[in-house]
Image (spheres, rainbow, N blue to C red):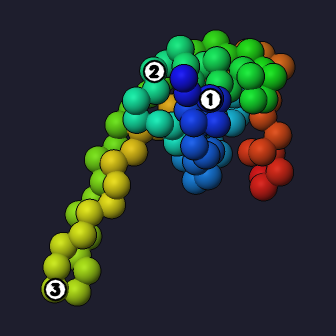
Amino acid sequence: MKTTRDVIIRPIVSEKSYAGIERNSYTFLVDPRANKTEIKEAIQKIWNVRVTSVRTLHRKGKVKRRRWTLGKRPDQKRAIVTLAEGDSIEIFEAGA
């Protein structure tokens, strides 16, 4: 059984994710094996908000050169979560 903290790894803090806050959508790095239902339930339980939709995407890790060899960044699964009108998550507002 996965706990809520196993499903949600951390919030994504970037210019693009901050642009989504005006549309009441937040971006999170999630466990690659988590499905949309588990993500929705975890967000609602951790932050006590109502989630209206969850969109997920897989990002392949970039291949980067490390001196003479090639290294690869890890693959990521991200979830873009849209909240109900009037709900917000404080973590993102603190830095803005």
- Would residue 85 be found to the left or right of residue 11 on screen? right
Residue depth check, mark 3 versus mark 1: number of the one nearer the observer: 1
Toward the bottom, the furthest residue is 67
Residue at the (70%, 34%) spot, across then down: 22
Which class describes the residues within 10 Å of circle 3: few (<14), some (14-19), or many (20+)? few
Where is 66 relative to 55, above or below? below
Name the element at disc 1.
Answer: loop
Where is the N terminus found, in terms of image quarters? top right
Q: Which residue is mark 3?
A: 68
State if disc 1 and disc 3 touch (CB < 8 Å): no
First in sequence: mark 2 or mark 3?
2
35, 51: nearer the viewer: 35
Residue 58 at x, y = what percent?
Answer: 35, 37
Residue depth check, mark 2 versus mark 1: number of the one nearer the observer: 1
Residue at the (58%, 53%) spot, across then down: 14
Image mark for residue 35: 2
Name the element at disc 2.
Answer: loop
First in sequence: mark 3 or mark 1?
1
- Would residue 17 be found to the left or right of residue 22 on screen? left
Write down the quadrant of residue 35 in the picture: top left
Which class describes the residues within 10 Å of circle 1: few (<14), some (14-19), or many (20+)? few
Amino acid type at circle 3 is Trp
